[in-house]
Amino acid sequence: MIKNTLKSLTVAAMLAGSAMAAAAQDYTLRATANSNENDEDYDGLVVFKNYVEAASNGAIAVELFIGTQLCGNGAECLQGVADGTIDIFVSTSGGASGIFPYVQVLDLPYLMADDRIAEHVLSGDFTRKMRDMALEDSGDSIRLMTIGNTGGWRNFANTKRRIAEPSDMEGLKIRTVVADLPQELVKALGAAPTPIPWPELFTSFQTGVVEGSKNGITDIMGMKFPDAGLKYVTLDGHAYMGALWWMNNARFMEMPEDLRRVVVDGFYALQQATFASPKRKSIEAYEQFVAEGGDLYVPTPEQKEAFKDGAAPVFDWFKANVGRGEEIFEALTTAVAEAEEEIGAARAADLN
């Protein structure tokens, strides 16, 4: 009888606890990523959910929708954020460029030298500047919370030959997204930009519709592109694959300050997770690529400088043709210069 009484009390306590927890969830955030559970975006969301729910003591619940359950593309998902039907969404720069064209600044080539510079820049005032611009241009409806990473660095990959210098790009049909800037970059380097939807890229390699792409190694191996003939990767690291994390601004601002702080800190934890995830995943991906007969090439400093010189016209095109392009270009190059100075001084200090 005592055993049964204890069991009843335990069940009652669990039910009471569940009721209290449900009552404590004053806010439920619906977060979506058009990816899958092997992606860095998902890694970041898991960290975000765990942190926010714990740090808010149950006052905030986070529901994850991975894939296209809530929306199918960047424009549709960002409209959902603006309308408030989606609370949180992550996009690439290409996915958001139709609404905020200046986010393509993240695709400008050869501006950030390495992870340390990129992470420093994206953790500071540059991101706050882009947040202010997006809020202004969306009528205070869409808030940029942070910029993380999704897939490491973009490198040129192709089915035909090793690319060691810009002249090797001549005539190659390179897959790009629909956004203008990646197409301008490919043209500046002598290749032919060919917009192809991501789901069609494998078949496009097989049939020769395209001969190359601008991707990170984890995407290349995750999509099994070597099976479609992709055999050459040049580690030129022309662009850091930024992931822009958006939130409905009204939803964020309706929270009390202590819970807004929890959400902000949650996005910081998410950002750090997405910075780290591609570094680990790329190790195995590169090993697998080489083991399957892939050719990896690291350009010399002189060759990389030649790529940068070849791509220079893209900077002028961006400033002249993209709305608020000069404004955001100045913000990024200033942030990069400050990061290089600060990190350079830190490195020097650590060497002595």
Image (cartoon, rainbow, N blue to C red):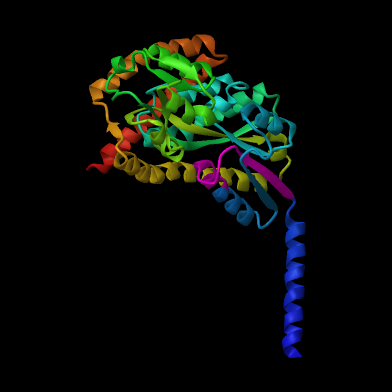
| Residue 39 sits above or below residue 159 on the image | below
Tell me the residue at 66%/32% (across/down): 77
Quarter of the image holding residue 72? top right
Of all residues, the one furthest to the bottom in this rendering is: 1
In the picture, measured across the screen, residue 210 lies left or right of residue 134, that is: left
Tell me the residue at 34%/39% (across/down): 289
Nearest the eye: 299 or 193: 193
Residue 122, image x and y in percent?
A: 48, 33
Tell me, yes or no, if residue 335 can be seen here.
no
* Residue 78 forms part of the magenta stretch: no
* Residue 35 forms part of the magenta stretch: yes
Nearest the eye: 339 or 49: 49
Tell me the residue at 60%/26% (across/down): 132
| Residue 186 sits above or below residue 220 on the image | above
Of all residues, the one furthest to the front in this rendering is: 207
Tell me the residue at 54%/50% (across/down): 47
**The residue stretch that appears in magenta:** 27-45
